[in-house]
Image: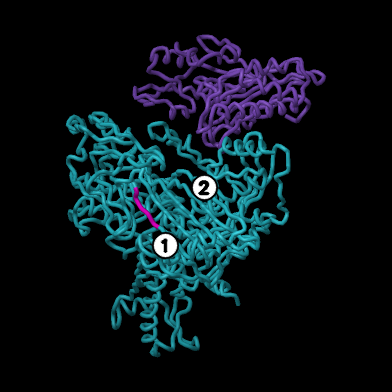
Chain colours: A purple, B cyan
Amino acid sequence: MKLSEFIRPASLAEARKSLRQLGPKGMPLAGGTALHFMPGKTPVTAVDITRLGLSYIKQKGDFFVIGAATPLADIQRYRGPRWAMHEICRRISTHQVRNVSTIGGNIARVFPWADLPVVLLAMDARLVIYSGKEKDMPADEYFSSQPARLFRGGDLLTAVKIPVLKAHHGFGSVKATRNATAFSLVTIAALLELKGGIIKSARVAAGSGIPFPQRLKPVEAALAGKEASTAVFREAAAAAGAAARWVGGEGMSADYIRQLAEVSILDALERAAEFARGRAA
Amino acid sequence: MNRHEKAKNFKQVNHSVTKIDALQLALGKDSYVADFVPNDALIVKMLWSPHAHARIKKLDVSRAEKMPGVKAVLWYGNVPRIAHCTAGQGFPEPSPYDTFMFDKKVRFVGDRVAAVAAETEEQALAALEAIKVEYELLKPVFTLDEAMAPGAPVIHDEAEAHVPIPIPYEPKKNLVAHVACEAGSFAEGLKQADFKFDHTYETPYAQHCPIEPYTSMARIAPSGRIEITTSTQVPFHCRRIVAKTLDVPVQKIRVIKPRIGGGFGCKQEILLDDVTAMFALRTGRACLWQFNREETFRTGRTRHPFRIRLQAGVKKDGTITAINMEAINNTGAYGGHGLTVVSCAGSKVLPLYHCENIKFDGKSYYTNLPVAGAYRGFGATQAFFAMESLMDQMAEAIGMDPMKFRQINHIREGEGSPIFAALGEGREGTPMTVGSNALAECIVQGAEAIGWKNRKDWRGKTGRYRRGIGMACLMQGSSIPDIDMGAASIKINDDGSFNLLVGATDLGTGSDTVLAQIAAEELETTTDKMIVYSSDTDLTPFDVGAYASSTTYLSGEAVRKAAAHAKSQILATGAEMLGVLPEEVHCEDSAVVNSDGSKKVTYGDIAKYSLYQKNQYQIIGTASHITKKSPPPFAAHYAEIEVDTWTGFIKVLNYVSTIDCGTAVNPQLAEGQTEGGTLNGISYALTEEYLFDANGRMQNASFADYHIYSMRDRPPLNIILVPSYEETGPFGAKSVSEVSINGAAPAFANALYNATGARVREFPLTPEKVLKAIKAVEGKK
């Protein structure tokens, strides 16, 4: 990506206006870490969105609201009741990158290896988009295909709303990597709602190892209404092959990645169940 | 007093003085090649071959030459065609002359096609796109089997390819080198064995990944000479090879080595300097060429992948009766270091254990894959994986603890090996007996640190996570005997400080500091009195450069001798000043002192006297050094791992890396080298991998996809320096830099077996490979 100009709008409205005018020649810029992966020699004007008050984390009713320009390092350090987002954030890249890379940048354009879409899908998050006024949409809709489609008219992602986990809810995530800073081979996130040891509802999502982050519906189906036990989790994990098209990478076969996904699903479910049963957040 | 305890009395050596360039580097002062580039330097960019094997039918640079900012374009049509070798080795090299500045043929993805020098990087890149090339694609050769097959495509079919010394070289068969020897009779030895083994091992490509990529800047000095500032391990070889390649006299070239951001062997190669020098000649301008990371992976040098067949026989009592190693390496598209690396697979490994019947056969073949070269460990790394894996298997067969099996068999002080005499570098080796050897102590201390006595046969366990402990014993060498030469000179200044000029090449290793300590120890002064200047072909004495674990041992002894030479002059002048006979004085704390200590003159006074006052002369010492031996540093490595038997992931719980490097001239730097080498080896064993597509193009040429360990991945590492005293080295020192990379792969393979019963004979130990091996074992149960 070649940046030729840089503008710093004073307000969201102004940012949107600039981006609308620039069209494909403009690009919202926050942490800027994705630039490295974006080819293209056409000069682009960067519209800085880091000074629009979009960097915050606050609890508001049933949601934690995270500003789109909040660096991952802040999310990693934040603590709130039954907060679970730090777990995945501390596994993303390096400390230096997390200091600048933002949650919005991580999900406004989804790279195949991105971890946050997986977590947000499992958590049933809501994504707030500004198009003159703010409105939000569920993660399922937002991540149904490349979200960049939503921002072509200069609209901007402004916040991510994550439901505050209730009692008996548990969350677990697993990121399998070759070394500490490598991209994920498989990322799995699971949200379980238990009632008396029975799984009332389950949301399980995957990313990396598949072309685009998605929920694993057959896995979820195999959990609902069943006892939260290792045997059930194992059986559900075995549905991974039917749930998504696993692809090889880093010299490893698709079949291996699927096996790794199955084990990761099992591990994520165990963690989620442990969380739901009352592990300290 | 044990011999090694001598080192305790040293005042400069065996002390962790601060690296003399530490402050400069920490403050970010101009230090590296790219720091010295003038603002108006031209930027060099290369058009690389997208094909693994092709002939260039047509090459048209006319449009590129007219592009804005372009000052010159180089291609085969406008440069001399001189066959040479890019490997920075002794002269004449034991490697083929099979490389041209530019050729009509490309032999791997990343081979040179044409180069542009332009005012800006953007202009240079734009010009590359304007170069038109028509290729005639040739059948590529990607595997050893393909390279060796009768009728295989000939990678070097040019008439000029030849070797400058009489060594086997058959380019028509893609054979780069062949070396063989036998001591005793392998066949007879095998007959005496109770157990016989025959296994084949494969080791992978890897890149050195120095933080500072290959960088070279050339310009024309006011005198008209070519001045090359370059990130190199071998400034003097660089001067010689550039002179040959450009067909200009050596006299016309000056090579300057500033601070270097790591080499590990890959900068023992002249890959940029011929081009920057040629551009400087053509344009009269300073020209900078710096590889990016992708170029470093694709075109930079790599580690030779090996296939090693190892046969051995062992008696029930633990006597190894016979060993046969057949090692074949893939040297890629060009053959530099092909012979020497395969020789070292034998010469640095086979002497480690007693055996009267040893046979070795080493071959090196061309392929159309990235070019291999020197890399820390240099053949020993690959062969130790095979040897140390088999040692565990032999121990198991005779029911002996693998540590004990090594203890009863390893070479000891005062012992030789027929291999030392049989395997040299393109000629016979040098007979040698081992002087210093603390391997026995390394094994004991390492075992204690890892908790070897608690190790059990854990193969019967059934849980998901399984623990295993494995070990490996290692050796390397210290310089190449009768070939490597280092030299130094040292002169005194008015205030009793010294200029120490060395050809030795500090790559970030700290050798400038270590050499200063050696000089200071010999001169009975302090290290901070040394002003070290290293590696400038105009100003410093010759040195072959930083490779073959030679700097401390070889260049260090040259420094010690030069310091002793200066010291004799200091003593003479000091005696003259004190009015006593030279025999009646000695040096002490930067002064010359008479026998009862009643009179003394400081080095500053002596310098001023000799420079300004009476019987004036420059006190200057100079010396050269070659060695008759290559004393091996020894090491015992221990790894404790946890294997996830469901996913195949290996977690390193604990790693103990012991080393006998003789006297550690600077213990902190020696530990740093050992830790770095060990971590380098762990990364190579577990995560580093060259992934190729069907056309021989590396698919993961970036740090995002090629996984090297960072400090975040560092497992608990316990580095133990076990002292010995090498009489032939400066103040008892031998080498430290290479040996530690050799241990991780076999130690992990042995630990994995201990944990699961899965025996892997190739690495990296990717989760998929490990899982497959575990499942194969479970399938048998």
* Residue where numbered disc 2 is placed: B200
In the rendered structure, the answer to whether residue B284 lies left or right of residue A47 reads left
Measuring 40% from the left and 76% from the top, which residue is drawn there?
B564
Chain letter for mark 1, please: B
Chain letter for mark 2, please: B
Residue B501 in magenta? Answer: no
Residue range corresponding to the magenta coloring: B175-179
Farthest residue, direction bottom: B580
Please rate how many residues cluster around mark 1, counting C-alpha atoms within 10 Å: few if below 14, some from 14 to 19, many from 20.
Answer: many
- On screen, A207 above or below B609? above
Please rate how many residues cluster around mark 2, counting C-alpha atoms within 10 Å: few if below 14, some from 14 to 19, many from 20.
Answer: some
Front residue (pair B172, A237): B172
- On screen, B227 above or below A57? below
Same-subunit check for callouts 1 and 2:
yes
Front residue (pair A53, A256): A256
Front residue (pair B151, B725): B151
Judged by depth in the image, the label closer to the viewer, 1 or 2, is 2
Between marks 1 and 2, how big is the CA–CA gap? 22 Å
Report if residue B292 is visible in the image: no
**What amino acid type is highlighted by mark number 1?**
Leu
- On screen, B175 above or below B568? above
Count of numbered tags: 2
**What amino acid type is highlighted by mark number 2?**
Thr
Farthest residue, direction right: A196
Name the image quarter holding residue B644: top right
Question: Percent from the top left, x then y, of residue A158?
Answer: 54, 17
In the rendered structure, the answer to whether residue B42 lies left or right of residue B348 reads left
* Quadrant of the image containing the N terminus of chain B: bottom right
Residue B178 in magenta? Answer: yes
